[in-house]
C-alpha cells in the first residue's frame, strides 16, 4: 500500500528582470486525467479579487471535457524556495495520486511579505514513475501591482518541449534497527537491490535527523531502474563515526505501484568488532510470491 505518495520533481524558474523575485509563499496545484475521478474544485483569488487567468490557448469545449475527468494534487506549498531573480528552484514533493501526464498546473502565491510581486518564467514537472517531464511556460507577472494584477495563473503544457526519460520505479524502504545494546550506528548505510531484470545503483539511505537508532524504524524513499522482481539485497555501511557497528533487524521494500512487500531479514551485526567482523550482508528476499527463496546468505561478501 502506498503510504508516502507518488514522487514528483518540480522546477520553478523566476524571470530575469528587475523586481522579479518574491518573498511570498508560492504554491502549485497539479491536474491530471482520470476516468474514475470526480470534478476537482479549487478556489483561488487574486489580491484584487479577480478570477485567475489562463495562459495558452484552450478551447472552451476542451476545458469542460477535461474538468469532468480531472483529478488534482491539492495545493502544494513550495516553502523552501528562494525565488530569486533569474534563478531556478527545485522541489521534490509527494502527491497521493499519479497524475502524469498532467493536463495543466496552477501556480500562485499568498501575497505575503514585503515584496510579494513575482515574475514567473516557467515551471517543469518530472514524474519518475512515468518518465515524463513537462514544460509549462508563463512569462508573466503574478503581482497585484503589475500587468493584469493576477497572483494566480493556470499554465498549460508546451507539448513540443515534453521530454521522455527512462521510467523509474519508486520504492518505500523500511529499516528496522535491532533493540539490543549498542545496536545503532553513526555510519553511512548503503543498499543495492537485485531483481530478475537487473540491479540498482548504490543507494545511500539518508534522512534529515538521526537514523538507525536502537529499536527504531526508519523510512526512506528512492527511485531506481526497473529491476523486476527482487530476490536479494546487499546492505553495508562505511564504518565511519564513533559508533559504526550496527545490528540490523530487517529491511522491508515495497514499490509504490506494487501490492507486495518484500522482507529481507538479517538479525545480525554489521560490525568489525562483533559476530564475524563483516560490515556487508547479502540477504535473500522473502515474500508470499517467492516459493523458493535463495539460500540464506546473511553473511559477509566472501
Image (tube, helix red, strand yellow):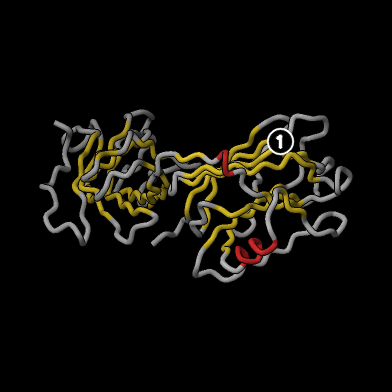
Quarter holding the C terminus is top left
Q: Is residue 302 left or right of residue 215?
A: left
Nearest the viewer among 230 and 242 is: 230
Q: Is residue 202 left or right of residue 55?
A: left
Residue 278, x across and y down, in percent: 20, 33
Q: Which residue is mark 1?
A: 14
Q: Is residue 97 left or right of residue 13?
A: left
Residue 229, x across and y down, in percent: 24, 50
Residue placed at 51% from the left, 59% from the top?
96
What is the number of callouts on the image? 1
Quarter holding the N terminus is bottom left
Q: Quadrant of residue 198?
A: top left
In the image, is residue 69 above or below residue 166?
A: below
Nearest the viewer among 183 and 282 is: 282
Residue placed at 79% from the left, 30% from the top?
17
Residue placed at 64% from the left, 39% from the top?
12
Residue 111, x across and y down, in percent: 80, 49
Q: Is label 1 in a helix, a strand or a loop?
A: strand
Nearest the viewer among 84 and 182 is: 84
- Mark 1 closeness class: few <14, some 14–19, many ≥20 residues within 10 Å: many
In the image, is residue 272 above or below residue 128?
A: above
Residue 146, x across and y down, in percent: 87, 43
Amino acid at each position: 500500500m502506498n503510504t508516502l505518495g507518488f514522487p514528483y520533481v518540480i522546477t520553478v524558474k523566476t524571470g530575469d528582470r528587475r523586481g522579479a523575485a518574491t518573498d511570498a509563499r508560492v504554491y502549485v496545484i497539479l491536474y491530471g486525467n482520470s476516468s474514475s475521478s470526480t470534478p476537482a474544485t479549487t478556489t483561488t483569488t487574486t489580491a484584487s479579487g479577480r478570477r485567475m487567468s489562463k495562459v495558452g490557448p484552450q478551447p472552451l469545449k476542451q476545458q469542460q471535457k477535461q474538468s469532468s475527468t480531472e483529478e488534482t494534487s491539492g495545493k502544494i506549498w513550495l516553502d523552501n524556495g528562494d525565488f530569486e531573480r533569474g534563478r531556478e528552484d527545485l522541489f521534490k514533493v509527494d502527491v497521493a495520486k499519479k497524475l502524469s501526464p498532467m493536463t495543466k498546473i496552477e501556480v500562485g502565491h499568498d501575497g505575503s511579505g514585503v515584496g510579494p510581486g513575482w515574475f514567473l518564467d516557467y515551471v517543469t514537472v518530472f514524474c519518475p514513475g512515468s518518465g515524463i517531464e513537462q514544460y509549462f511556460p508563463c512569462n508573466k507577472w503574478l503581482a497585484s501591482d503589475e500587468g493584469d494584477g493576477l497572483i494566480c495563473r493556470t499554465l498549460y503544457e508546451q507539448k513540443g518541449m515534453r521530454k521522455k526519460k527512462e521510467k523509474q520505479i519508486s520504492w518505500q524502504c523500511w529499516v528496522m534497527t535491532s533493540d539490543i545494546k549498542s545496536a545503532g550506528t553513526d555510519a553511512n548505510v548503503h543498499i543495492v537491490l537485485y531483481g530478475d531484470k537487473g540491479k540498482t545503483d548504490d543507494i545511500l539511505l539518508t534522512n534529515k535527523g538521526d537514523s538507525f537508532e536502537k529499536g527504531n524504524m526508519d523510512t526512506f524513499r528512492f527511485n531506481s531502474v526497473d529491476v523486476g522482481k527482487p530476490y536479494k539485497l546487499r546492505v553495508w555501511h562505511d564504518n565511519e563515526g564513533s559508533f559504526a557497528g550496527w545490528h540490523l533487524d530487517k529491511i522491508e521494500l515495497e514499490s509504490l505501484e506494487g501490492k507486495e512487500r518484500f522482507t529481507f531479514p538479517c538479525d545480525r551485526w554489521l560490525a568489525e568488532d562483533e559476530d564475524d567482523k563483516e560490515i556487508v550482508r547479502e540477504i535473500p528476499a522473502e515474500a508470499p510470491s517467492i516459493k523458493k527463496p535463495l539460500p540464506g546468505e546473511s553473511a559477509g561478501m566472501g
